[in-house]
Amino acid sequence: MYLQRRNRILRTNASIRSLVAETQLTPNDFIVPLFIDEGENVRTEITSMPGYFRMSLDLTLREVEELYKLGIKCVLLFVKTFDELKDNEGKEAWNPDGLMQRSIRAIKNAFPEMVVMTDVALDPYSIYGHDGIVIDGEIVNDETVEALVKMSLSHAQAGADFIAPSDMMDGRIGAMRHALEQNGYIKTGIMAYSAKYASCFYGPFRDALDSAPGFGDKKTYQMNYANRLEAIKETLMDIEEGADIVMVKPAMAYLDIIREIANTVNVPVSAYHVSGEYAMIKAAAKMGWIDENKAIIESLTSIKRAGAGLIATYYAKDAAKLLG
């Protein structure tokens, strides 16, 4: 049989396959979400995220050191707030001596080359578990943006390299950029959660921070997962308002959205490989139905192949070790 072209030639062995691979995954691609708790020597496994922990700041610093040695250069910080510090306005969110602010300073002082990103949303600080201020049962927009600006400025003052607003309120990127410029924080970047969908895949994350909504859901501010064009519109608006990096969240069920946005914009695109996606792999691997290590690399490679130059993932450390 004569064939003009034999495509299998480029799949002959591992060396050739590596040589012609279109997508290369490296530790430089990873953003590591870190959950930080008060206290000392605290290391609490998150039940719905086996193998992942909420840690006190002293242990977090050890973790950051290990991550940096593995070639990972970026962390994304989340903190757990005591119930007695929660209110409707989220005032603890901009406490200069709050856990987030102390964590930023400690990590940047110990590891100045580590890029520190910080979550900006009110849900960990809210008595209602929502990303915004609640008035008469409604999550209000403009009052929330004012609170988020205060939160962002406190993170910038503490030394954050990037603030990462995950709230999906209208106009918050422009308000944050204006406030940063007005207050002299001209080197502080914004990674906007631009296309954040109202997804069932966030469940384990809410266990990590005890931040599940106390009533209703988040569908009045997070996006409808049926929509594609809306994601492009939201992302372009965030870029116009001053976002340096844009994010799609979740990742695995939204690879088409990642690709659409990557084809449309001229800023870096990130994606969040969320807690539910992590938990599904963990559960299937525990049952012996899939090879966990292979699933890690295949999943993360697919996210990068779709167009994400940065990937926030709970598998970052495992992946860095596997990539060796």
Image: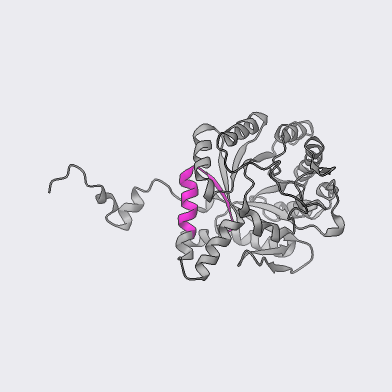
**What is the x, y in percent for residue 305?**
45, 46
Q: Residue drawn 63% across and 60% down? A: 65
Q: Nearer the viewer, residue 186 or 143?
A: 143
| Number of numbered discs on residues | 0
Image height check: is 86 above or below 261?
A: below
Q: Is residue 170 left or right of residue 82?
A: left
As drawn, the residue found furthest toward the top would be 240
Question: Which residue is pictured at 64% across the width and 28% down the height?
Answer: 240
Give the extent of the magenta segment. 296-314
Q: Quadrant of residue 239?
A: top right
Q: Nearest the camera: 301 or 204?
A: 204
What colouring style does the render use? one colour
Confirm whether the magenta stretch covers residue 50. no
When asked about the image quadrant of residue 5, the answer is top left
At which x and y percent is residue 180?
Answer: 75, 35
Q: Nearer the viewer, residue 52 or 138?
A: 138
Relative to 209, is 301 on the left or the right?
left
x then y, percent, for residue 102: 78, 54
Residue at 72% over, 33% down? 171
Q: Residue 281, percent across and down?
A: 53, 62
Instruction: State the residue at coordinates (18%, 42%).
Output: 4
Answer whether residue 38 is visible to the viewer in this image: yes
Vertical position of residue 187 compared to residue 93: above or below: above
Reply yes or no: does residue 309 show up in magenta. yes
